[in-house]
Amino acid sequence: MKPIYLFLFFLLSSSFLSAAEAEKVETLALGAIAPNFDLPGVDGKRYQLSDFQSARALAVVFTCNHCPDARAARGKLIKLQKDYQSKGVAVIAISGNDDKALLEEEIGYSVYGDSFEDMKAVAKEEGYEFPYLYDGETQSVTKAYGAQATPHVFVFDQARKLRYAGRLDDARRSRKDVGPAYVRQALDAILAGKEVETKSTRAFGCSTKWSWKRENEVKDEKEWSALPVTLENLDTKQAKALAANKTEKLRIINFWSTTCGPCIVEFPELVETMRRFQFRPVDFITVSLDPVAKKDQALKFLKSQRAALAPRLAKSVNEEGRVSNNYLFTEQNLDQLAEAIDPEWSGALPHTVIIAPGGEILWRHTGRFDVVELRRAIMKHFDAVDGE
C-alpha cells in the first residue's frame, strides 16, 4: 500500500474511533413513547415491551451488579415491585453494561461483576420477582432509553408515554430512604390520573459501561502486566507483625506452594480478586511454603500469575517497612508460622485468612476456596464499615 493511502487509511480509522468514543447518548425525552425491546431474562425467558401491555404503569430500571449505588437500590426495587404489583404496576430491571468494558478495580464494591451469569446469581440471591434483563451484548435498548448511570429509572403511563426519568430518591449509596421518593411519587400520580410533579432528576450513580470503553480495559491489562513481581523472605517475627495488622487495611493472607494442586488452581482467582479490590484498603499477601532452595521456582510461578503489588498500595506497604506482597517462609518449624498467624490452621494447603485492622481473624478457609465466598467475606467487612 502506498504511503498516501496508508496515511488516509490511518486518518479515516482514527476519525472513526474518535467518533465512536465521542458518541453521545441522549436520555429519552419526556412524553416520548417507550422504545420496544426483545431481551433475555435471567429466568431463561425473553421479554418484549408488549408483554407488559396490561400494566397501568411501567417502571424500567437500568441497573447492574457491580455499582455500589445499584447495590444499595436492590432492596428498594424489590419493595417497589411488591408494593405496586397489586396496583397494576410492572417493574423491569435491565443491565446494559458491557462487562468486558469494566476495569478490574471497578468491581471492588461488589461480590459479582456484570456478566449475564453474574446477573443470574444476584437475582437468585436477592429473590428478584421482577424480570432482570440483559442488554450488555448490543446495548441497543440502553442507548434507545438513554440510560446514563446505574440506577436510572424511566416511568411510563398506560399509554407508555414517559412521565418521569431519573433516580429513585436522594439516598445515593445508602440503603435507607432519603429525600423524596421520586419514582413512587410519579407512580402515585399516574395511578391517580394526575400530573407528575417532579418529572426528571439526575441519575446519580456509576456511569454506563459502554462497549467503546473496552480499550480502557485492554490498556489496564497491559499496565498490570508490566508491573514488577517480587518475592521476599519471611521469618516468624515478620509473620507476627503481618498478623497483628497494625494498619487500617483489611489483610488477606494466602498460604501456598508450587507443589500444591489446589493452590495452583485457585491462584488466578486470588490475583483477580486482588486486582478487583486494589482501589480499596485491602492488602493481599501470599506466603509460599516452598523450600528456600526453590525460591526461584516460586518466583517464576508468581510472575506467571502476575501477582504484583498494586501501585495504589505501594505507599502504605512501604510505610510498614515492607517492599513486597509475596513472601517465602525461610524457617524450618512451620508450627511457628501457624502460631504466628492462625493457630487454628492445621497446616494443610492452601489456607487463606482475612484479618481485620487490629489483628482479628474474620474469615479462614483450608483447601481451595470458593472465590464468591472469599469476596463475600471481604464485602461483609466493608459493608459493616460503611454502615450498609
Image (cartoon, rainbow, N blue to C red):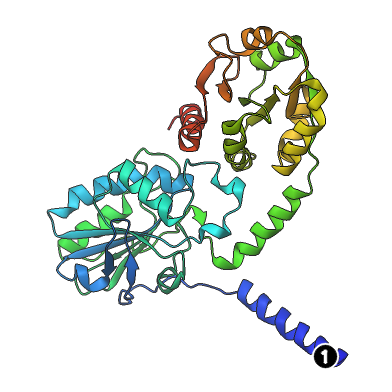
Q: Is residue 373 above or below residue 184?
A: above
Residue that extends furthest to the left in the rendered view of this protein: 86
Quarter where residue 141 is shown = bottom left
Q: Is residue 233 above or below residue 337?
A: below
Which residue is at a point 69% across and 11% down the rendered structure image?
A: 240
Side of 160 where 63 appears, left or right? right
Which residue is at a point 20% across and 57% down the rendered structure image?
A: 188
Residue highlighted by disc 1: 1
Q: Nearer the viewer, residue 168 or 380?
A: 380
Quarter where residue 159 is shown = bottom left
Label 1: which secondary element: loop
Side of 353 where 225 appears, left or right? right
Q: Nearer the viewer, residue 108 or 170?
A: 108
Q: Is residue 294 above or below residue 23?
A: above
Quarter where residue 6 is shown = bottom right
Q: Is residue 320 above or below residue 88?
A: above
The N terminus, quarter of image: bottom right
**x then y, percent, for residue 155:** 29, 63
Q: Looking at the picture, which amino acid does disc 1 mark?
A: Met
Binning the other alpha carbons within 10 Å of mark 1 as few (below 14), some (14 to 19) or many (20 upward) gives few
Which residue is at a point 19% across and 48% down the rendered structure image?
A: 83
**x then y, percent, for residue 80:** 25, 49
**x then y, percent, for residue 354:** 56, 23
The C terminus, quarter of image: top left
* Visible residue check, residue 67: yes
